[in-house]
Image (cartoon, helix red, strand yellow):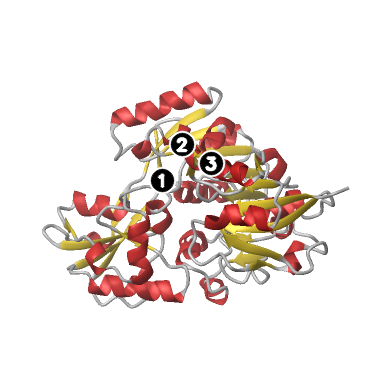
């Protein structure tokens, strides 16, 4: 029997998981290549043989998505499998047309095909868009589970941008682990806040192996999603975060709408800063699309480090990179804090250098704020140079981590932090108790 020749279109994460779970051991399928997009400098590599398995002794090449048509012809591709997240339906349709015109079929895998089943209860936190507030929601759920007596391990959506074989299974329990793993700014933004609160984080490439390791040290697993991707684990409770600052996006982006339709609970976040009409619009969409889901309102209160005085000062606002880039947001917490405290925003674009300047060219919708891009040492250096060149009195750091830990910033710098706070009832604690997930006894230690 001739094997179906498959090309997996991805962005260094979901694509590798789909291969590992769905295709790696199938004799009737040959995955001839991955394509890559969204993340800088991930194409031109090879998915290593140690992860690809015995059927792929030379590994699998990772090619630029921009060359899709040529790749379909070069590898005689039968089917292109779409495997990344936070894209419009128009984007998916255009990619389908390119594949079809080149002579290949086009497919989306269902979440059921790609979810792993755990022996432990799983709470999954996903979203309808990047930057909706998954991270503070996940940390809030982790704290509630710990307070109820459960040991919690977080399994984080993948961000394997370095040595894939070395990153197959990663465990982060201390800041030193981040240094040893040579993590990027984006990785640190997701792992460091959990570590600060005493939660162990697992991530990497091979999620079956990751799951087996994490199950050894927890009573409850907490899936911390990336972008608006679906969970890699079958959840006992699926919490999905929606953002009324982008009302309507919950039905325009893939696979955010899938998450919405699967949700047990939808957290309508940022109700303290979003227009009331937008909050009502999102809630009406939830009721129409996922009528069985519990709707929970939450605020994202912003705290300014040390009560800093910003009125009348020229401020450079630095925000979470993915939220501004493929997340499509023009601002974040630092921008909100600057406006609330009467500061003048400094436009970083005239001062941007290298890949930071190219980021602004690629994503022209970004407002007068600086995305914290840091995929490797060279880009971190360019980010620092952009900060130093900017004509600002104060640097306002709105990223989930303190950038001062990674780079020297000569200008006065102030952090902006934010959390999640439920408004009214139901609360996340009530939802967890109703699902039978709060108050689980801690497993007895072996004799």
What is the quadrant of residue 369 in the picture?
bottom left
Q: Residues within 10 Å of mark 3 (few under 14, many from 20)?
A: some
Horizontal side of 79 relative to 389 (left or right) equals right
Horizontal side of 246 relative to 93 (left or right) equals left
2 or 3: mark nearer the eye? 3
Q: Which residue is mark 2?
A: 267
Of mark 3 and mark 1, the one earlier in the sequence is 3
User: Which secondary structure, mark 2?
Assistant: strand
State the image coordinates of residue 401 (x, y, percent, origin top left).
41, 63
Is the C-beta separation of discs 3 and 1 under 8 Å? no
User: Which secondary structure, mark 1?
Assistant: loop
Q: Which residue is mark 1?
A: 420
Horizontal side of 290 relative to 247 (left or right) equals right
Q: Can the viewer see residue 440 in this picture?
A: no
User: Which secondary structure, mark 3?
Assistant: helix
Q: Which residue is mark 3?
A: 92
Of mark 2 and mark 1, the one earlier in the sequence is 2
Residue occupying image coordinates x 18% and y 53%: 341
State the image coordinates of residue 445 (x, y, percent, origin top left).
75, 59
Q: Residues within 10 Å of mark 1 (few under 14, many from 20)?
A: many
> Does residue 71 sit above or below 256 in this rendering?
below
Q: Can the viewer see residue 94 in this picture?
A: yes
Q: Nearer the viewer, residue 125 or 19?
A: 19
Is the C-beta separation of discs 2 and 1 under 8 Å? yes
Horizontal side of 278 relative to 337 (left or right) equals right
State the image coordinates of residue 41 (x, y, percent, origin top left).
51, 67
> Does residue 53 sit above or below 233 in this rendering?
below
Residue occupying image coordinates x 50% and y 63%: 187
| Mark 2 vs mark 3, CA separation in Å | 26 Å
Q: Residues within 10 Å of mark 2 (few under 14, many from 20)?
A: many
């Amino acid at each position: 029997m001739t094997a179906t020749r498959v090309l997996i279109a991805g962005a260094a994460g979901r694509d590798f998981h789909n291969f590992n779970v769905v295709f790696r051991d199938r004799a009737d399928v040959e995955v001839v290549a991955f394509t890559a997009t969204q993340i800088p400098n991930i194409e031109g590599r090879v998915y290593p043989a140690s992860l690809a398995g015995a059927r792929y002794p030379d590994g699998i090449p990772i090619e630029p998505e921009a060359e899709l048509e040529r790749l379909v012809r070069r590898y005689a591709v039968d089917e292109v499998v779409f495997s990344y997240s936070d894209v419009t339906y128009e984007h998916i349709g255009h990619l389908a047309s390119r594949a079809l015109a080149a002579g290949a079929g086009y497919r989306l895998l269902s979440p059921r095909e790609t979810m792993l089943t755990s022996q432990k209860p799983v709470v999954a936190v996903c979203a309808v868009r990047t930057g909706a507030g998954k991270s503070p929601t996940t940390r809030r759920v982790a704290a509630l589970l710990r307070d109820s007596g459960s040991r919690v391990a977080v399994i984080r959506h993948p961000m394997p941008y370095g040595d894939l074989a070395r990153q197959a299974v990663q465990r982060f329990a201390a800041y030193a682990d981040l240094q040893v793993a040579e993590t990027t700014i984006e990785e640190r933004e997701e792992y460091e806040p959990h570590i600060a609160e005493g939660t162990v984080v697992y991530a990497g490439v091979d999620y079956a192996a990751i799951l087996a390791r994490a199950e050894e040290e927890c009573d409850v697993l907490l899936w911390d999603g990336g972008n608006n991707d679906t969970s890699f684990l079958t959840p006992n409770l699926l919490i999905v975060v929606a953002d009324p600052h982008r009302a309507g996006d919950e039905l325009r982006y893939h696979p955010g709408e899938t998450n919405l339709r699967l949700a047990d609970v939808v957290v309508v976040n940022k109700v303290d800063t979003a227009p009331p009409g937008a909050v009502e619009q999102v809630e009406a969409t939830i009721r129409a699309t996922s009528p069985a889901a519990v709707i929970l309102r939450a605020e994202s209160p912003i705290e300014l480090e040390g009560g800093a005085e910003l009125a009348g000062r020229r401020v450079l606002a630095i925000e979470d990179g993915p939220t501004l880039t493929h997340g499509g947001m023009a601002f974040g917490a630092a921008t909100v804090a600057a406006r609330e405290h009467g500061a003048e925003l400094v436009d970083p674009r005239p001062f941007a250098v290298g890949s930071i300047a190219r980021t602004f060219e690629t994503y022209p919708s970004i407002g007068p704020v600086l995305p914290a891009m840091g995929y490797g040492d060279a880009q971190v250096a360019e980010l620092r140079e952009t900060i130093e060149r900017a004509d600002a009195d104060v640097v306002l750091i709105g990223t989930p981590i303190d950038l001062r830990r990674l780079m020297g910033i000569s200008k006065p710098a102030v952090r902006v932090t934010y959390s999640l706070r439920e408004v009214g009832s139901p609360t996340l604690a009530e939802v967890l108790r109703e699902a039978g997930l709060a108050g689980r006894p801690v497993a007895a230690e072996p004799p």
